[in-house]
Image (spheres, helix red, strand yellow):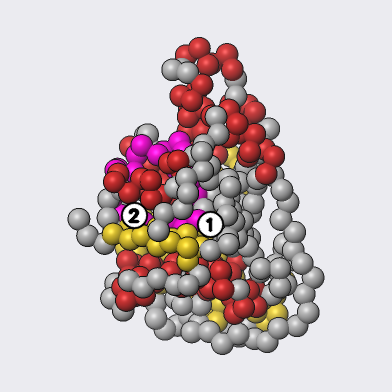
Amino acid sequence: MKLPLVLGLAATERLAVILAVLLLPQLGPAAGEYPVPERTYDVGIHTLQFDYTDPEGVSKTFDAAVWYPTSDEVFEYTYSNGPKSYLAEDGAVAETGGPFPLIIFNHGFNASEMQSLYLKEALAAEGYIVASVHFDDNIWSGFFDLLKLGNLQNSNGVDDYVHQVYEKYFNTYRFPIAEALLEYMVQENGREASLFAGSIDTGAIAMGGHSFGGLTTLGLIGGSNDPSRLDSRIKAALMLSAPSYPFEDNYGNVHIPIMSMKGELDVLLNRPEDNFWYLNDGVNPPYYDLVVKNADHFTFSETDSGLGWVPAAIDEDSQLQVIITYSLAFFDLYLKDDTAAATILAQTSPTLASYISETGP
């Protein structure tokens, strides 16, 4: 099944959509009580800061967080953005089942490392280490600074110019920071005094993200126009409600398994090439493209589905459950080599409006 094509906006209107819609705040609801969830692994959380120095020698400190399987007892935990869960803060990494695959998850524009909590906890509970950084998505020093229309004369029209603006934004504010977090986690794996010493399977690293986070992921797996951005350590990629622009012509450069999900009601993915099925002829298998019924752009960035508790969202929201089910099966197959996951990936779900996959040449 193919969804009706939504006509794309003019190139200049794309930025207006970002400014008008993606700057909406994300608010956490009040919460009552919820029972401790039964999980394969209990989940630990570790918040941290790491330093990054840009090519011009300017240093900045970034906040980040890591979710992981733990062997310690969990307690009620309130996230900085409001939702509650049961976590072991700075608990020991689980003693059995490791080393664990690493997933770098990149948040959407104007969000934070505390986005998509339902997915991060669900993955950690099944034996993954999930790390997220809070990007410096500063609109004033970002798009407005880069939109110097005097440079338009050096481009091949408005669309080419906006492509350049987007690419420079990702090169400056996104790609290097995501790479810095990945490198930080790899170094922590080798540092004897680290909480994560020896706990990461550095041969099983994936990346994923929502919206701009998906674009960040795409750029680092071959989508960028700069081939040096390709990180060969990334073995699989998950893109949630992510546009293709401005990397829509570069999918042929991606040679790892990819899964793309979007919502049936996502009006922000408004260009033809933002519909993944439109690009299938240019995408190398294996790939998976899912459209979730009645979901919108922000379904994928949910924290707790408005229920106050992250475990409640995982237990009770069918849209989030289908996102978790297919994401987990995808990573199980391509990071853990769990062939049983292929059975799940071969089936569709009533919660999906469409599902297209190609596993071989």
Q: Residue 164, percent across and down?
A: 48, 27
Task: Tell me, yes or no, whether the highlighted magenta stretch contains residue 161.
Answer: no
- Left or right, residue 71 beside residue 326: right
User: Which stretch did the figure color magenta?
Assistant: 242-263
Cα gap from disc 1 to disc 2, whole angstroms: 32 Å
Q: Residue 212, percent across and down?
A: 54, 46
Which is nearer the eye, 3 or 38?
A: 3
Which is nearer the eye, 218 or 47?
A: 218
Quarter of the picture containing the C terminus is bottom left
Residue at 38% in and 42% down: 223
Give amino acid for label 1. Answer: Glu
Look at mark 2 in the image and give the residue it sits on: 233
Task: Tell me, yes or no, whether the highlighted magenta stretch contains residue 260.
Answer: yes
Quarter of the picture containing the N terminus is bottom left
- Left or right, residue 71 beside residue 199: right
Residue at 79% in and 70% down: 30
Residue at 60% in and 66% down: 117
Which is nearer the eye, 242 or 227?
A: 242
Count of numbered circles on the image: 2
Within the image, what quadrant is residue 237 found in?
bottom left
Within the image, what quadrant is residue 173 found in?
top right
Secondary structure of residue under mark 2:
loop
Give amino acid for label 2. Answer: Arg
Which is nearer the eye, 240 or 79?
A: 240
Q: Residue 66, percent across and down?
A: 55, 65
Look at mark 1 in the image and give the residue it sits on: 264
Q: Residue 231, percent across and down?
A: 35, 48
